[in-house]
Image: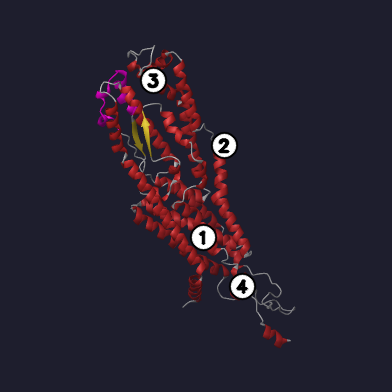
Amino acid sequence: MSPFLVRARLELRQLLRARVPLVVASLLLVAGVAAIVDGAARVAAEREVIAALEPALKEEESYLRKTHAPNDDLGLVLYYLAMPVAHEPNAWTALSTGLRDVHPYSRHLRFIGLVPQLYQTDIANPLKQLAGSFDYGFVLVFLVPLFIVGVSYDGRSRDDDLGTEPLVGSQPTRLSRLLALRLALRAALVSAVALALFAFAVAWLGIPLDARAGAFALASLVYVALWFLLVFLVASLRRSSAWNAVALVGAWIAWCVLLPALVNLAILTAAPARGGVELTLAQRQEQNAGWDRPKRAVLDPFFARRPEWASTPVPEDHFSWPWYYAMHEMGDVHVAREVEAYHAALARREQWTARAALALPPLALQLLLDRMAGTDMATELAFRDSIAAYHEQLKQYFYPLVFNYKGLAAFDIDAVPRHRFEGAAQPVQLSALAGLLGVLALLGALLPLAVRRIDRAPRREEATSTGTRPLRPPSDQEPPSDRYVLLTRDEKARET
């Protein structure tokens, strides 16, 4: 057996005998399994809610027919009717909560102003946003790097701590190869944990083994390799174990917490937008102002927008449902440009976030997972656009009934259009995957310099705490090599 294989066998035996890495790996597995199971339970509960929307709509229709006469004005009934809209989760959604902890999976859309219904969900619970969500994405993006730091920060410096570096340096294997061997064994352990969790997710959630699954597995392994490359580069600085641990934890804070927060602040500053609360207030102010204006101030712009109803007789001296719903629509029209600007600003923020992910691997991996789970901002914007289109379909169905003053008897719930959103299955976000591979290549380019620094001969020092010292050659001779020859205490005694 070659000396390298013998050394690999010894390093593997030491790793398996160490209890801390195996215990922490077990805890990481438990945390990942718990996150996957919890995510699956939340998604299952949301699917049950979505499945109950249609039966609830039928019950609501039955209640309205019981509490209203057949000849009652349909406009009054429509004020209470709420049509369900849903963003159904896919198999990946349980792995990453994304925006779903702020924006719900399902909503009820009434036949009134759209903007207050669509953007009032932007009012999020700040405590919930602060706490975040414990899901598989959190385990992979945040906890796995900490595990890597914990099991590998002393891959080179532990020989200094144990006083065995001169003995290790006297071996025929170069120090860089020895460090690479140690980190490779730990990388195999971490990769096995990550792949085991993903395999459990595939089996538990029924994720199809397609190109997206392969791309995500590749991204996960690249993410693990990135952190081990960073450990190798830090180890090449030949500092103490405590210094390595602080440096790696600082890198984790910078990559996973600080830099994403700074990027988010910069993006919010560069792409300002009126929030959903401001849009809701502006729409309601314009809508409520219609109560104090003449009826023609609302009807004339409405008829100009929808000339097919310009011949409808609308009383101007008392309340009428055609005027009421026209007032709601004109409130939406009043903030239409602001809504478009708001969507454009959110789209720009999404684009800048994707660009920032090219240099931030944790952000890139999170965006890649959110995209496949359908919980990213681009999917949320597409869902909002589908709600706006569905609201227009409801108008096209109900306006002929309302403006012709039809009664409840003319209403058929089965003929009302239903909302459909086909945006759950998303392709792989190639820019995020390219960012991970790009950072991996950049760190890999520094490896030759790190290898030379590690293999550089250690500085000769005086006796260490073990009571040994380097053997100094005679002054008239050149040192035969840069390796140390150690003398034990007994040999020094005999020499004396």
Front position among marks 1 and 2: 1
Relative to 405, residue 372 above or below: below
Please tell me which residue lies in front, 443 or 22.
22
Front position among marks 4 and 3: 3
Instruction: Tell me the residue that label 1 is attached to.
Output: 147
Mark-to-mark CA distance, 3 and 1: 61 Å
- Can you tell which mark lies on residue 105? none
> Could you say whether the residue bearing mark 3 is in a helix, strand or loop?
helix
Q: Say whether disc 1 or disc 4 marks the residue closer to the N-terminus.
A: 1
Front position among marks 3 and 1: 3
Instruction: Tell me the residue that label 3 is attached to.
Output: 324
Mark-to-mark CA distance, 1 and 4: 23 Å
- The part of the chain drawn in magenta is 392-417
Mark-to-mark CA distance, 1 and 2: 34 Å
Indicate yes or no whether the magenta region holds residue 401: yes
Instruction: Tell me the residue that label 4 is attached to.
Output: 162
- Can you tell which mark lies on residue 269? 2
User: Which x, y percent locates residue 247?
Assistant: 61, 58
